Every structure is written in structure tokens, then in C-alpha cells.
Image: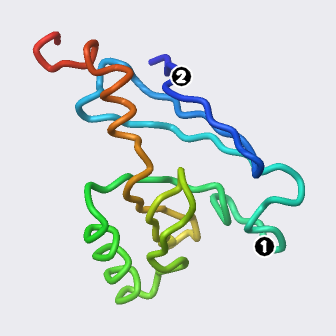
């Protein structure tokens, strides 16, 4: 199924794009593509892995408490790779866990994924229209 551009972002550190399905604004699945500019990669010097250090799967959660819960569960399970931390906009409040293969999974709050999907695609994504 073709993905459509939801939002394009850029700043002094790099650029990115959010892609998704406009008919799913009430339950968005968004593919986030991002690239840091030379000299701006906060993960520079970290060993390269399949989905790490920055290449990762990201899941936006509804509250900061939900991110804290995932961080606590990751710490208890020995897979917390980045503790719950408030990052600059648009990153928001995040933590990162690794799966058994070493891939990174980010849990975030306040990146604006849901709000942007509803604002841009809300009219087309209304469940009554399906």
C-alpha cells in the first residue's frame, strides 16, 4: 500500500519525513525517516548495528508515564539502552530498548505523530468514512 507524506522536517541537525496512510488518522502507523547532517549525529562513534544506534523502530505512546513504564520494564528485563529522557523538539520524551537481536525500539511521548496525523488526515481518516 503506498505511503503518503504526512510531514517534512529540517533543522540545523538534519532532516526527516513522516510517511503513512491518510485513511488511518485515528490509528496512525507512521514510518519516520531521518538523517543527521555531518558533525551532528548524537550517535557518532557508536558501533553500527542493523537497527542501531539511530536507525530504529519508533512507537509513540499517549503519556510520559507510559514511556516511564516501558523504561522500567526494559530496565527490569535488561534491555534498556537509553533511559527515559526529555529530548529537544520534535523528539520529545523517549526511551529506547533493544530486542534480542540488538535492534532498537524507541518509545516516545509528545513527538506530535497522532496530532499531526489527525490534523492533516483527520477528515479523510474518519472511521465513519470507511
Q: Position of residue 46 (x, y in %)?
A: 77, 74
Q: For residue 118, which quarter of the picture?
A: top left
Q: Position of residue 127 (x, y in %)?
A: 15, 20
- Whichever of labels 2 and 1 marks the residue nearer the N terminus, that label is 2
**Relative vertical location of residue 5 with respect to residue 72 in this rendering, above or below:** above
**Relative vertical location of residue 38 with respect to residue 49 in this rendering, above or below:** above
Categorize mark 1 by other alpha carbons within 10 Å: few (<14), some (14-19), many (20+). Answer: few
Q: Which residue is mark 1?
A: 47
Which residue sits at x=66%, y=63%? 52
Which residue sits at x=34%, y=26%? 119
Q: Nearer the viewer, mark 2 or mark 1?
A: 2
Drawn side of residue 44 relative to residue 53, left or right:
right
108 or 46: nearer the viewer: 108
**Mark carried by residue 5:** 2
**Relative vertical location of residue 54 with respect to residue 9 in this rendering, above or below:** below
115 or 83: nearer the viewer: 115
* C-beta proximity under 8 Å, tags 2 and 1: no
Q: Position of residue 51 (x, y in %)?
A: 63, 58
31 or 89: nearer the viewer: 89
Which residue sits at x=29%, y=27%? 25
78 or 121: nearer the viewer: 121
**Relative vertical location of residue 101 with respect to residue 109 in this rendering, above or below:** below
Categorize mark 2 by other alpha carbons within 10 Å: few (<14), some (14-19), many (20+). Answer: few
Amino acid at each position: 500500500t503506498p505511503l503518503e507524506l504526512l510531514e517534512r522536517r529540517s533543522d540545523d541537525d538534519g532532516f526527516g519525513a513522516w510517511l503513512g496512510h491518510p485513511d488511518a488518522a485515528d490509528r496512525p502507523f507512521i514510518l519516520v525517516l531521518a538523517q543527521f547532517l555531518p558533525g551532528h549525529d548524537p550517535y557518532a562513534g557508536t558501533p553500527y548495528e542493523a537497527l542501531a544506534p539511530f536507525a530504529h523502530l519508533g512507537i509513540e505512546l499517549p503519556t510520559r508515564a507510559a514511556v516511564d513504564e516501558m523504561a522500567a520494564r526494559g530496565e527490569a528485563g535488561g534491555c534498556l539502552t537509553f533511559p527515559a529522557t526529555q529530548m529537544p523538539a520534535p523528539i520529545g520524551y523517549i526511551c529506547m530498548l533493544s530486542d534480542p537481536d540488538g535492534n532498537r525500539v524507541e518509545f516516545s511521548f509528545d513527538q506530535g505523530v497522532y496530532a499531526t496525523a489527525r490534523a492533516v488526515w483527520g477528515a479523510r481518516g474518519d472511521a465513519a468514512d470507511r
